[in-house]
Image (cartoon, grey):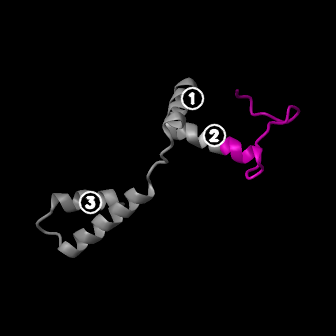
Amino acid sequence: MKTPDTADRLEDAANRITDISRADLQIMLRRAALLLRNSGSIAFDDDMEEALRDLSNEFGKTRNDTVRLIVREWMEQNTYLPVHDLDEDGEVDGTA
């Protein structure tokens, strides 16, 4: 059985709104607000948004996946992350 997350708790509270205490509802709403506040997306200037939109369409990826790809490649190129190069003489598992 999974532990109920904030969304599950909010849905449960909505289903039994007359039974839930005001204090419990305040706690759940504050947690939800905190999660929303911390999960926001990055806003860029219009020219960057346009370039991201074009790249996303070209790559067939979502905007967020494109941003992740760009940041990962930049971090690899600037040695903040290890580069995952394939060794031409190395073993492969037989899949492409």
Q: Tag 3 or tag 2, which sits nearer the N-term?
A: 3
Foreground pick, 39 / 28: 39
Tell me the residue at 29%/71% (across/down).
27
Which quadrant holds residue 51?
A: top right
- Picture residue at 28% right of the left edge, 64% below the top: 29
Mark 2 in CB contact with mark 3 (< 8 angstroms): no
Please tell me whether residue 8 belongs to the stretch shown in magenta.
Answer: no
- Residue occupied by mark 3: 10
**Residue 25 or residue 16, whichever sits in front:** 25
Picture quadrant of residue 25: bottom left
As drawn, which residue projects farthest toward the top? 58
* Mark seen at residue 55: 1
Residue 72 sits above or below residue 92 on the image: below
Q: Which residue is mark 2?
A: 70
Dot 3 crowding, Cα within 10 Å, few <14, some 14–19, many 20+:
some
Of badges 1 and 3, the one in the foreground is 1
In terms of secondary structure, where does tag 1 sit? helix
Residue 22 placed where, x, y %? 18, 73
Q: Is residue 74 above or below residue 23?
A: above
Q: Quadrant of the N terminus?
A: bottom left
Q: Earlier in the sequence, mark 2 or mark 1?
A: 1
Question: Quick check: marks 2 and 1 in contact, CB under 8 Å?
Answer: yes
Chain part drawn in magenta: 72-96
